[in-house]
């Protein structure tokens, strides 16, 4: 591969297989598949979902909704508490696509019912224990008020409850994730029963990548919204959501220096490429990526004893085994499996100094 | 201010004052001022340096050198171990500007002496204790070999020794930084003596923001290359390099949710805007930013008891005091002082989803 700067390499066949498996899981469970597009942020990759009959998507900002609306997607949920400062952009968007918004307070939906010039579906975000945002399940008065406002408005239409059980990100393995999963679905199921007329006309929208990857049953759920699964990454690997062979994205980085006294390589590839997301490895300690060799058709599994020890703006300092140190020369291009693919993609998108020559930051390989 | 999405707000008068003070310090000490432009990454802000007669700059990549060459800068040091994979771009660059490259091995300079089609100045990077990259001071054989190759080549010209004493970033206060500073200058001074013909024709290029901000004497140094000082940030504040009133950059973020049970606000402003750089605060623990109120002409000092507790891709979760919680409404725009301004700027540059509508991510205020 002809690589001279930090470059996102995307294995298309792994990525399409990840999409296929998740689409199958949704289909088998009779769930609407509404994948989160914030991970790949790419109209090209978005097209790969259409082959599995995906027509509904999730995004995390009004800007991103606009981008994917331009790319022909017309049923979009913005899974972020509605930012009322962007009302004009929301109205423009709502005039051309079927739009769902997220609210976490009666004030927000009151504002929307008065100010929207389009119609929009409304999901109430429920906090099932992650404590990032969302109404707590016991805030039934607020929930009732929101539903009431929707019922008396022609612009806002109550759709149901949405949850991102992000506490799965601090879990390890199927058992721990299963516990969070069951608790979250219990909470959402109770709300559906409490507020639904026979529970029939209230949707439950659910799904982080760990739950959607590891769980097989989704009782009471109507749609899933995983995002990261499209590429996976080291964080997901250590949670237990994926194997190394399912990770579809690495960053290729040229080696620019060797330091024999500490068996370390320095690569062109730093915090502005990988992001500063780290994880605590049981053996290596804090790390910012694992190291792979590039091959004819892709890359190897992570090399034993090799990890990204520190990052500054453009430098990556990589601790390597004596064998890899001997074999690697300055000018060699090695691969780094990122800790968090969403952030690496965002870092590499658009900024002319991070190496992305064109609008798409991906070098796509495989068939 | 008319802000609806995460927006970098740059206080021009603070920024120009930071530039003026550093230019004065260089001038008083008879040092060439070669500021590092990787922090602001902006041709517009680059122009502000010309008012202080700056004609020489530092960048961290070949791409960034190309951008600033296009903006009329013609004496550029790429302070990053030369990435030989980019030889064609380096040659194009060297044909139009006076270029200095950084080497950390005889192999690299051998390669350059054979392959460059332009001429280039060569700095040897010396590791005075940061252990990111650079030759150790005791690697005199390698240093001698590099100088020898330069002397026998018409393309590569030995310029001197360059050091980034990044270990100052784990220091607190003038005394600790002074110790690193004196040790580093001692090492560089010894090398200059050992390898210089009377020491006269070998340059010493030095300077991280903490040292250049806090130190007044630079014995043996010929030029300084600080970068971050142009904006400063929380990391520099906690190191002791600056006061709050010298920090020239914040990120304005709309509040999108309030969570009374935990006295927390959620803003539109996450890891893709601020970066995941964190610091360990003595009272608040790990934080990703401090909080300010926007004013008519800028912003306040950080609000007591308020800090960014966690970041996900687009969400910032902010722990606030009861007073601020009461006063702040959804839709209010608050300011966040970033931990690391260089990374926040890089995150906000170019990516259409981080809120930067145009090529420049800055909203410039002040005169």
Image: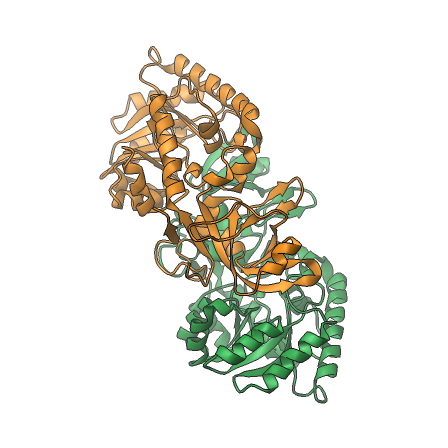
Chain colours: A green, B orange
**Residue B265 appears in the rendering:** no
- Report the residue at 62% width, 71% height from top: A105
Which quarter of the figure has residue B358? bottom left
Percent coordinates x, y for residue A257 in the rendering: 46, 35
For the question of whether residue B73 can be seen, the reply is yes
Q: How many marks?
A: 0
Image x and y of residue A307, in percent? 59, 43
> From the viewer's perspective, is B347 left or right of B109?
right
Q: Is residue B341 above or below residue A189?
A: above
Kindly give the residue lying farthest to the left in the view shown. Answer: B96
Could you say where residue A163 lies in the image, as x and y percent from the top left? 65, 70
Between B23 and B202, which is closer to the camera in this rendering?
B23
Vertical placement of A187 versus B74: above or below?
A: below
Residue at 45 percent of width and 31 percent of height: B208
Q: Is B99 placed above or below A96 here? A: above
Q: Position of residue A135 (x, y in %)?
A: 67, 69
Q: B327 and A192: which one is in front?
A: B327
Which residue is at the far top? B198
Determine the residue positioned at 64% across, 81% down: A147
């Amino acid at each position: 591969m002809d690589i001279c700067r930090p470059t996102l390499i995307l294995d298309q066949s792994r990525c399409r297989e990840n999409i296929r498996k998740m689409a199958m899981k949704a289909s088998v469970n009779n769930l609407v598949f509404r994948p989160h597009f914030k991970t790949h942020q790419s109209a090209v990759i978005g097209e790969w979902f259409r082959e599995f009959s995906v027509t509904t998507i999730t995004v995390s900002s009004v800007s991103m909704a606009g981008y994917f609306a331009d790319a022909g997607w017309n049923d979009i949920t913005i899974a972020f508490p509605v930012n009322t400062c962007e009302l004009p952009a929301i109205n423009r968007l709502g005039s051309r696509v079927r739009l769902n918004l997220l609210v976490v307070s009666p004030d927000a939906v009151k504002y929307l019912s008065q100010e929207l010039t389009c119609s929009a579906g409304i999901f109430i975000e429920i906090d099932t224990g992650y404590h990032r945002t969302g109404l707590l399940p016991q805030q039934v008065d607020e929930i009732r008020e929101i539903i009431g406002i929707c019922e008396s408005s022609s612009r806002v239409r109550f759709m149901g409850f949405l949850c991102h059980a992000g506490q799965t990100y601090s879990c390890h393995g199927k058992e721990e994730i299963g516990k969070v999963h069951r608790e979250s679905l219990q909470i959402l199921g109770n709300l559906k029963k409490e507020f639904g007329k026979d529970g029939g006309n209230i949707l439950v929208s659910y799904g982080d990548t760990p739950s959607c990857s590891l769980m097989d049953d989704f009782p009471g759920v109507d749609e899933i919204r995983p995002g990261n699964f499209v590429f996976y990454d080291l964080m997901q690997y250590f949670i237990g959501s994926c194997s190394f062979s399912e990770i579809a994205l690495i960053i290729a980085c040229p080696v620019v220096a060797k330091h024999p006294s500490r068996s370390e390589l320095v690569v062109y590839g730093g915090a502005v490429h990988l992001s500063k997301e780290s994880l605590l490895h049981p053996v290596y300690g804090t790390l910012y990526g694992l190291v792979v060799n590039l091959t004819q058709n892709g890359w190897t599994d992570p090399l034993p004893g090799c990890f990204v020890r520190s990052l500054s703006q453009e430098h990556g300092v990589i601790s390597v085994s004596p064998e890899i140190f001997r074999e690697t020369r300055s000018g060699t291009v090695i691969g780094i499996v990122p800790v968090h693919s969403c952030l690496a993609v965002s870092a590499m998108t658009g900024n002319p100094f991070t190496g992305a020559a064109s609008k798409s930051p991906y070098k796509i390989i495989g068939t």
